[in-house]
């Protein structure tokens, strides 16, 4: 064994965990507020374009026959996908007692909430008459009209709202002990704010017991959602007869893709956060390494899915499906498909190298590739397949206009805006759980990373 | 809709207008109109009233019925009593409504100031000025007054002549851009009279067309559409089930050529020579009919120069082709007919001779006794009027119709001549290029607002009555002329004995009764004519014999065209440009090129390569043209975007007529090129040079790919296969025993369905425009069509077969595609709010109020027939008055689609219930089926095996198919396959 690094056998103590996490929440400086203002500006741009779209009509977009779905649904699926890793890390890995989850799960869960909130906007942005979006939910009315339960969009409505509720509950419950901690040390309006959120937490045995049980139950409840939500989203497409979408592999393939993109976005967020918020001691290379292994694994799963999807089409010998795939691979928009393969299947293979897995810059770059690749995947799937549907006379390739671009950029602004505010006002790493597993945290700091040669 | 008619003002209008509906054409002498079906005391708000009148959009003279609701005409339909239209109507005829309600119509009289600007004046002032100038001109001497304009029917034209005479002038020119002059000249040469024959295509076994686009623009397309469908339907000929043989010679594939067994891409100008070569073969092969009475030796001498081999060398048309097609013609035992539409008079003579020598004169080509006199002036007469204008001999010129400033050949120098006229008075509806030249602009009634009569052929006397009160403060042209004669021409003016045009029409009709010997009181005759739209009688065939002088006609070989040629063809919708201000016609894709809202230069890929153009489209649009070429014409260079197409002869640049307006309203102005401006008189082609420019201009089409990729969309089968009972294989195999999760829907009452005969459809697009008119379908404009947002609920889909496919199958695959009203409608389960739902009668209803615009339905529709309102639809006033009150105007953000005209279904069902009976077969006719000249669409009840629609399926068992059966959507529309002949066997 190599020699110990850091501050001896106990490089980090309970108080260090608390202080590091609390330091993040110290009143912010100018740089932070400039960053938030920039994000707010992006949101404002997106909102103004959306307002114009509602007022003038969807005609301001590049939509048209046959691309009745395009960027907005792509964004919807993208953000729902992002939302998946949160529950995977917080619930599934919790049940499996995975040790490295403690440092990243809060971040992943927060990401989940804001990703779902962002995703939920897109079906509304997409609607021709968004002011009637509430017709999608069953509510008592004098005409006894209910939504159509045969429509995958109705399933979507339930899947997403269930997921949002569960995730929000899970997140806010997990926050309670940490918030109580904050409550005890803060003053002024923050104290009031934390007091409400802490729900009277005293840290008694009884509370801890109930907390643990409730957390376990919620984790058990959330686990099937990891599989179900994105399966339901995939059925939006798989139940359609449109060539290029009508495939039974979609549910597992979408779930794998969702975890892939979600974990990649956790990396994208974590790498700068570690540096800027100085939490390298709480989120160590060990954590990042494990996250990237998930990315690598899911990348292989979706590569396999791509191959299976194409194989099944070839095996079916259905001329219309074959032509759609031919267009996808070799048509005039094949560069999108090529980009998707590069980003999702080839670039993540670099993660086989332990050096790259432990190099934050490499990880960040690769995770950006994955994010782009997964967005492209959905775009190719939706806009690409619809472009070359059954009647060739109606073929047409879609090109987005400024409205879609602005709203998409605005959605990233909206997500990061919320996320940035969260990091300043609520603990972005779980102090409680890090302290519970401090042995492993110490180990990951103390011992040189197994793959890294001794300095 | 946001602007226009609110509910409140609609009700107000309905109340006042229904009172007015009884007297729509009331000025100045109130005359009651007799509705077509119901007597006028029964006019009820919300119930349509039908008035029979005559279509004035071209010279075919179809009878039409105007559907009037609350005093506004909302739809034109064919008049079933009229033997020409027989209840059908073409695209251009339907769009007459957009001329009537055109937003750019002149609303009040205008005077042009010396600086060129226009100033509105009162009618009194305008009339005074008009009368003063006329009086002065009349006093100044003979021939100081002139008229150039369109013919408006025999009675009104007679008034025009009388008006001119009252001012001591005979300078009247009735101008028509696409004149029948070559046909009349040829008839004079062959038969010694300038009459035009009528054709009976349905009686023929073989048709040869020498560039006569008889299904699109030539002569009488509605009538020919019907006849051709019958000609081409499989029937027993010579004891064998067969379809007619049909060959088309012409530089470009059009609707007519698309249905041919063989399209021979002859060079423009060579049709005459080729026709003579066909005649040569027919005569030399001894296929001259014994009873034709033709001097065979004389014909042989006449065509001696036209040996097929020699003509082949000259025109590039293979000699074998000429011989083969001549054999079809000569050996047809059950009649054959040759048609000529080319500008070359030689082609017309040859076609007449072909019909005569094979004994088809009087059979498929008939001259009728008592043919009405020519409506249009001969070119020399028109030129004489213009020359007089140029020489300063004319003080007052009236221009009414015909748009001579736009459509006259440059050699006439009409614009220059007009400058020498002191006072130019323009009368019309939408101010066009000719109005730009006028000093005084007088808003005239649209044809649907005025009294007219028509005489399209012997035995048919059409009556055009006003079908509603005028939209604007306009006056009838001939009311103005009669008034001017009475008030400004002194004693001479009193020679016109009529009060006004209405009086003139009724007077001439009372004379007509005695002339044609119909019994009954004059009132009965008049009322009956107004009720049925005219008087229709069987005309006797006239004796027509070839005159001996025909053999002395010069029959020189045409010069061999060298290099590139520009050849202009009438646009099937814009025609000679008169359709350009109608947005329906601009937005409906030209059936063969599928291009909208533009002019284009159609060139063959080889020619394009010579010009240095390879790829000619943008990536997003797989098809539309992009590169601009500069064509140098004698009248200066012209720039046009290139549409590369295999459907045009190499070396020919085909350009449509109809665009290139510098005036004529918002829809027409500033689009494309006007070929009239550079073509020589009487010709449609000219040798040019062309070069590629660096500019790009995108041609707009709603079409994606032209390749059907063997999918089961528009199917065809050979006649032999039909006889043998062999079904063609398209795409994936249909599912034998589809798995059904839900129990099948039980349709206890009606179950509506359609049978569409692809073999009959010629792509004329009458159905498309009928649907626009009936269902308040919005026009979205050029840019939005480019984005794939065309709203038409029914589209004429066309695919170009590959060379190999075209070698055996049809030359072009054309069929109307509307919502297939599937039983397993893919659109229905995916709608989260039940906006798309199934009716108990098997329709896929779309509930606009409920739609939130997820657009899931269209994604799942294999036929891609649903349309989304990307913007709030616009109906610029007064086009909103045309909206059908029975159909919802959809707002922004909702999907819409074909409903099989559910408003018509419901109306019939309500009627039936009121009368306590079942709905009868044929009682419900959707707008598309009603308009179709070829009767390709039949609507009916699938649950009623005796319905005409089901019978049509049964009668054509061997060729029924449903589109894309692999999706197991179970459409209610069954298509009948297109039929073709095995090549070489025909």
Image (spheres, rainbow, N blue to C red):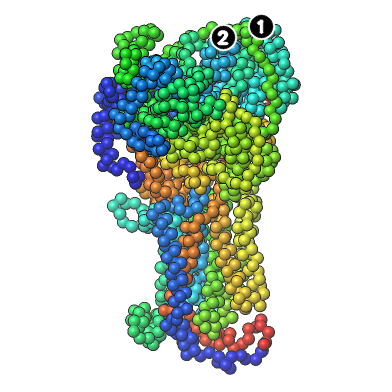
- Foreground mark, 1 or 2, reads 2
Q: Is residue A280 left or right of residue A179?
A: right
Q: The numbered mark 1 sits on a residue in which chain?
A: B
> Front-most of B636 and B313?
B636
Q: Where is residue B160 in the image (x, y as percent from the top left)?
A: 40, 19
Labels 1 and 2 touching (C-beta < 8 A): no
> Front-most of B423 and A289?
B423
Which image quadrant: the C terminus of chain B? top right
Mark sitting on residue B427 = none
Q: Position of residue B956 (x, y in %)?
A: 54, 27
Which image quadrant: the N terminus of chain B? top left
Q: Distance between the residues labelled 1 and 2?
A: 16 Å
Task: Identify residue for label 2.
Answer: B192
Please tell me which residue is depicted at 36% across the width and 53% down the height of the picture.
A146
Please tell me which residue is depicted at 55% across the width and 92% down the height of the picture.
A10
Which residue, as the protein is rendered here, is positioned at the far bottom? A8
Task: Identify residue for label 1.
Answer: B295
> Front-most of B289 and B6?
B6
Q: Is mark 1 on a helix, strand or loop?
A: loop
Q: In this view, does B370 lie to the left or right of A454?
A: left
Please tell me which residue is depicted at 52% across the width and 70% down the height of the picture.
A85
**How many dots with numbers?**
2
Q: Position of residue B941 (x, y in %)?
A: 43, 32
Q: Can residue B692 be seen in this view?
A: yes
Q: Is residue B317 visible?
A: no
**Vertical comparison of A143 with B643: above or below:** below
Quarter residue B434 falls in: top left
> Front-most of B560 and B768?
B560
| Label 2 packing within 10 angstroms: few (<14), some (14-19), many (20+) | some
Please tell me which residue is depicted at 44% across the width and 24% down the height of the picture.
B149
Which residue, as the protein is rendered here, is positioned at the far front? B140
């Amino acid at each position: 064994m190599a020699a110990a690094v850091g501050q001896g056998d106990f490089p980090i103590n309970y108080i260090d965990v608390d202080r590091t996490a609390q330091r993040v929440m110290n009143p912010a400086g100018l740089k932070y507020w400039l960053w938030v203002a920039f994000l707010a500006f992006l949101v404002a741009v997106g909102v103004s374009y959306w307002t114009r779209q509602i007022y003038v009509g969807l005609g301001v977009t590049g939509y048209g026959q046959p691309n009745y779905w395009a960027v907005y649904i792509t964004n919807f699926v993208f953000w729902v996908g992002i939302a998946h890793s949160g529950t995977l890390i917080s619930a599934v890995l919790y049940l499996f007692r995975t040790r490295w989850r403690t440092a990243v799960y809060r971040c992943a869960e927060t990401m989940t909430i804001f990703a779902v909130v962002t995703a939920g906007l897109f079906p509304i942005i997409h609607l021709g008459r968004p002011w009637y979006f509430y017709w999608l939910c069953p509510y008592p009315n004098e005409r006894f009209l209910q939504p159509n339960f045969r429509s995958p969009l109705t399933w979507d409505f339930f899947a997403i709202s269930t997921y949002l509720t569960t995730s929000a509950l899970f997140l806010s419950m997990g926050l309670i002990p940490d918030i109580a901690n904050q409550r005890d040390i803060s003053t002024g309006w923050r104290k009031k704010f934390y007091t409400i959120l802490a729900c009277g937490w005293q840290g008694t045995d009884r509370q801890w017991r109930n907390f643990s049980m409730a957390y376990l139950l919620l984790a058990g409840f959330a686990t099937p959602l990891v599989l179900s939500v994105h399966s339901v989203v995939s059925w939006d497409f798989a139940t359609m007869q449109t060539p290029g979408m009508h495939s039974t592999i979609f549910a597992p393939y979408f779930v794998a893709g969702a975890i892939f993109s979600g974990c990649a976005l956790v990396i994208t967020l974590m790498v700068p956060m570690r540096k800027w918020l100085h939490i390298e001691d709480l989120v160590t290379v060990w954590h990042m390494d494990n996250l990237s292994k998930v990315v690598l694994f899911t990348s292989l799963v979706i590569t396999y899915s791509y191959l299976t999807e194409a194989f099944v089409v070839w095996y079916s010998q259905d001329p219309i499906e074959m032509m759609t795939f031919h267009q996808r691979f070799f048509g005039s928009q094949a560069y999108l498909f090529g980009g998707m393969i590069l980003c999702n299947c080839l670039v993540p293979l670099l993660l086989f190298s332990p050096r790259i897995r432990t190099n934050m810059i490499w990880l960040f770059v690769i995770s950006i590739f994955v994010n782009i690749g997964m967005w492209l995947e959905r775009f190719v799937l939706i806009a690409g397949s619809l472009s070359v549907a059954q009647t060739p006379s109606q073929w047409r390739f879609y090109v987005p206009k400024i409205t879609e671009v602005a709203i998409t950029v605005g959605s990233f602004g909206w997500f990061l805006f919320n996320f940035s505010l969260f990091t300043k006002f609520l603990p972005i790493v779980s102090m409680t759980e890090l302290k519970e597993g401090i042995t492993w945290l110490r180990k990951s700091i103390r011992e040189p990373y197994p793959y890294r040669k001794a300095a | 809709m946001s602007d226009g008619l609110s509910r409140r003002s609609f009700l107000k209008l309905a109340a006042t207008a229904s009172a007015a509906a009884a007297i729509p054409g009331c000025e100045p002498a109130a005359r009651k109109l007799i509705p077509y079906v119901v007597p006028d005391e029964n006019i009820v708000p919300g119930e349509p009233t039908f008035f029979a009148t005559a279509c004035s959009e071209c010279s075919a003279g179809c009878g039409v019925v105007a559907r009037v609701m609350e005093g506004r005409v909302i739809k034109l339909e064919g008049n079933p009593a009229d033997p020409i239209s027989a209840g059908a109507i073409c695209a251009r005829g339907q769009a007459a409504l957009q001329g009537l309600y055109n937003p750019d119509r002149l609303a009040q009289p205008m005077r042009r100031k010396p600086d060129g600007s226009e100033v509105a004046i009162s009618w009194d002032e305008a009339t005074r000025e008009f009368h003063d100038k006329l009086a002065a001109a009349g006093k100044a001497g003979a021939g100081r007054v002139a008229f150039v304009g369109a013919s408006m029917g025999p009675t009104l034209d007679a008034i025009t002549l009388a008006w001119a005479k009252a001012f001591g002038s005979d300078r009247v020119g009735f101008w028509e851009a696409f004149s029948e002059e070559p046909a009349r000249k040829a008839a004079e040469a062959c038969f010694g009279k300038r009459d035009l024959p009528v054709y009976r295509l349905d009686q023929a076994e073989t048709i040869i067309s020498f560039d006569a686009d008889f299904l699109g623009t030539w002569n009488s397309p509605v009538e020919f559409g019907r006849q051709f469908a019958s000609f081409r339907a499989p029937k027993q000929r010579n004891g064998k089930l067969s379809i007619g043989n049909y060959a088309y010679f012409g530089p470009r594939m059009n609707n007519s050529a698309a249905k041919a067994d063989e399209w021979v891409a002859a060079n423009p100008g060579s049709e005459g020579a080729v026709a003579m070569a066909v005649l040569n073969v027919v005569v030399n092969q001894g296929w001259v009919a014994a009873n034709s009475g033709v001097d065979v030796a004389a014909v042989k001498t006449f065509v001696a120069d036209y040996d097929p081999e020699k003509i082949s060398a000259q025109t590039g048309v293979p000699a074998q082709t000429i011989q083969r097609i001549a054999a079809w013609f000569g050996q047809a035992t059950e009649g054959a007919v040759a048609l000529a539409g080319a500008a070359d008079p030689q082609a017309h003579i040859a076609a007449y001779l072909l019909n005569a020598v094979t004994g088809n004169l009087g059979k498929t080509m008939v001259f009728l006794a008592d043919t009405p006199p020519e409506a249009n002036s001969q070119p020399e007469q028109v030129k004489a009027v213009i020359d007089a204008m140029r020489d300063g001999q004319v003080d007052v010129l009236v221009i009414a119709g015909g748009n001579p400033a736009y459509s006259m050949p440059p050699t006439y120098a009409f614009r220059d001549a007009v400058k020498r006229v002191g006072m130019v008075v323009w009368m019309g509806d939408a101010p066009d290029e000719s109005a730009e030249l006028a000093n005084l602009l007088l808003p005239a009634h649209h044809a649907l607002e005025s009294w007219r009569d028509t005489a399209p052929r012997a035995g048919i006397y059409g009556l055009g009555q006003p079908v509603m009160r005028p939209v604007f403060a306009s006056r009838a042209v001939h009311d103005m002329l009669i008034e001017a004669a009475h008030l400004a021409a002194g004693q001479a003016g009193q020679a016109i004995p009529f009060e006004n045009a209405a009086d003139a029409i009724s007077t001439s009709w009372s004379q007509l009764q005695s002339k044609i010997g119909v019994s009954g009181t004059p009132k009965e005759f008049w009322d009956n004519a107004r009720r049925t739209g005219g008087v229709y009688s069987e005309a006797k065939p006239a004796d027509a014999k070839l005159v001996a002088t025909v053999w002395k006609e010069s029959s020189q070989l045409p010069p061999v065209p060298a290099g590139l040629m520009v050849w202009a063809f009438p646009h099937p919708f814009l025609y000679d440009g008169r359709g350009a201000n109608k947005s329906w016609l601009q937005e409906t894709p030209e059936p063969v090129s599928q291009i909208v809202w533009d002019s284009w230069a159609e060139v063959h890929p080889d020619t394009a390569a010579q010009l240095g153009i390879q790829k000619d489209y943008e990536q997003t649009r797989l098809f539309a043209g992009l590169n601009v070429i500069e064509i140098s014409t004698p009248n200066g260079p012209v720039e046009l975007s290139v549409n590369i197409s295999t459907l045009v002869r190499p070396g020919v640049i085909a350009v449509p007529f109809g665009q290139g307006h510098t005036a004529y309203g918002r829809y027409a102005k500033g689009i494309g090129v006007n070929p009239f401006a550079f073509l020589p008189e009487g010709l449609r082609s000219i040798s040019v040079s062309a070069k590629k420019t660096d500019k790009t201009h995108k041609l707009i089409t709603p079409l994606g790919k032209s390749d059907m990729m063997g999918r089961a969309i528009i199917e065809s089968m050979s006649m032999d296969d039909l006889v043998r009972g062999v079904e063609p294989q398209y795409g994936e195999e249909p599912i034998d025993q589809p798995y059904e999760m839900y129990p099948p829907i039980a349709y206890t009452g009606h179950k509506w369905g359609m049978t569409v005969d692809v073999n009959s459809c010629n792509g004329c697009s009458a159905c498309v425009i009928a649907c626009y008119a009936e269902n308040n379908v919005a026009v979205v404009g050029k840019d939005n069509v480019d984005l794939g947002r065309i709203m038409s609920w029914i589209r004429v889909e066309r695919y170009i077969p590959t060379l190999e496919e075209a070698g055996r199958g049809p030359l072009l695959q054309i069929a109307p595609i509307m919502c297939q009203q599937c039983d397993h409608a893919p659109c229905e389960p995916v709608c989260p709010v039940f906006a798309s739902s199934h009716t108990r009668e098997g329709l896929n209803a779309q509930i606009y109020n409920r739609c939130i615009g997820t657009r899931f339905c269209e994604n799942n529709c294999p036929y891609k027939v649903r349309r989304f309102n990307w913007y709030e639809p616009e109906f610029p006033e007064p086009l909103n008055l045309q909206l059908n009150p029975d159909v919802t105007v959809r707002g922004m953000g909702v999907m819409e689609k074909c409903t099989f005209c559910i408003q018509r279904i419901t109306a019939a069902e309500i009627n039936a219930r009121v009368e306590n009976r079942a709905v009868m077969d044929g009682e419900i006719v959707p707008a598309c089926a009603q308009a179709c000249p070829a009767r390709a669409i039949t609507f009916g009840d699938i649950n009623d095996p005796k319905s005409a629609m089901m019978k049509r399926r049964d009668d054509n068992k061997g060729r029924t198919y449903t589109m894309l059966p692999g999706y197991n959507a179970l459409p209610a529309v069954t298509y009948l396959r297109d039929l073709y002949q095995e090549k070489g066997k025909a």
